[in-house]
Image (cartoon, grey):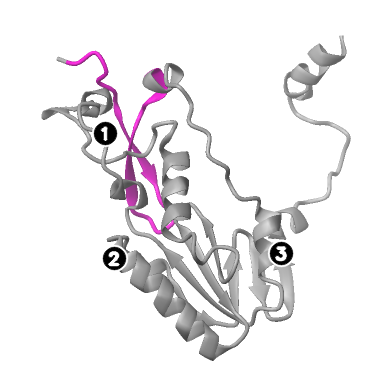
Amino acid sequence: MSTCAVLVILVPKKDGTWRMCVDCRAINNITVKYRHPIPRLDDMLDELHGSCVFYKIDLKSDYHHIRMKERDEWKSVFKTKYGLYEWLVMPFGLTNVPSTFMRLMNLVLCAFIGRFVVVYFDDILVYSKNLDDHKVHLKSVLDVLRNEKLFANLKKCTFCTDKLVFFGFVVSAQGIQVDEEKVRAIQEWPSPTSRFVNDFSSIAAPLTEVLV
């Protein structure tokens, strides 16, 4: 038996496969939070100014690259119909996992960040002003990732292109634009035909409570 055993959750991915997560709310509530600076999206986009060639790398099994602290594995126990198991690597769901992984990426790629690389968790974008520079930049990044045993998900990588989508924005040599797929739902939203809003009082209840 374990005092920390939690349930397993399967979360669907965009490609139709499933990601195994654990419901860590109980242990997260009593965990001392580790804060590591997360880069601002607008700052990252500003760094791409003047670039013409891009390469996007998506890491495979990102959080699982980090070993759990020895003797702390029991805190990650999860239960299945086959019995109890504990994680030896960082699982999805623990509150400090994203910050810990972001710190790892900053340490691994610190020599390149701000020069020709931006990193946001498991997404790495290599940017260059011309193809010759891009080859040198890309080799430098891939050599470091290989040495650190960080492997890419080939299906989700974008190779040597002059245009790609990065966090909802289309990045190209012409500049940065909003991805049309992200705003299409708003553009195609039907115009209201009456002033009636179903269950408006329930929807607006939080606003009403603030005003009272």
**Mark 3, residues whose alpha carbon is within 10 Å: few (<14), some, or many (≥20)?**
few
Badge 1 element = loop
In the image, what residue type sits under mark 1? Lys
What residue would you read off at disc 2? Answer: 147
**Position of residue 112 in the picture relative to residue 17 (left or right):** right
**Position of residue 29 in the picture relative to residue 88 (left or right):** right
* Whole-percent x, y for residue 52 in the image: 63, 82
State yes or no: residue 174 in magenta. no
Q: Nearer the viewer, residue 149 or 163?
A: 149
Q: Could you say which quadrant of the image residue 208 lies in?
A: top right
Question: Which range is magenta?
Answer: 2-26
Q: Residue furthest front?
A: 111
Badge 2 element = helix
**C-alpha span from label 1 to label 3:** 37 Å
Residue at figure coordinates x 74%, y 53% from the top left:
186
User: Foreground mark, 2 or 3?
Assistant: 2
Please identify the quadrant where the N terminus is shown: top left
* Whole-percent x, y for residue 164 in the image: 58, 73
**C-alpha span from label 2 to label 3:** 29 Å
Q: Is residue 181 visible?
A: no
**Mark 1, residues whose alpha carbon is within 10 Å: few (<14), some, or many (≥20)?**
few
Badge 3 element = helix
In the image, what residue type sits under mark 3? Asp
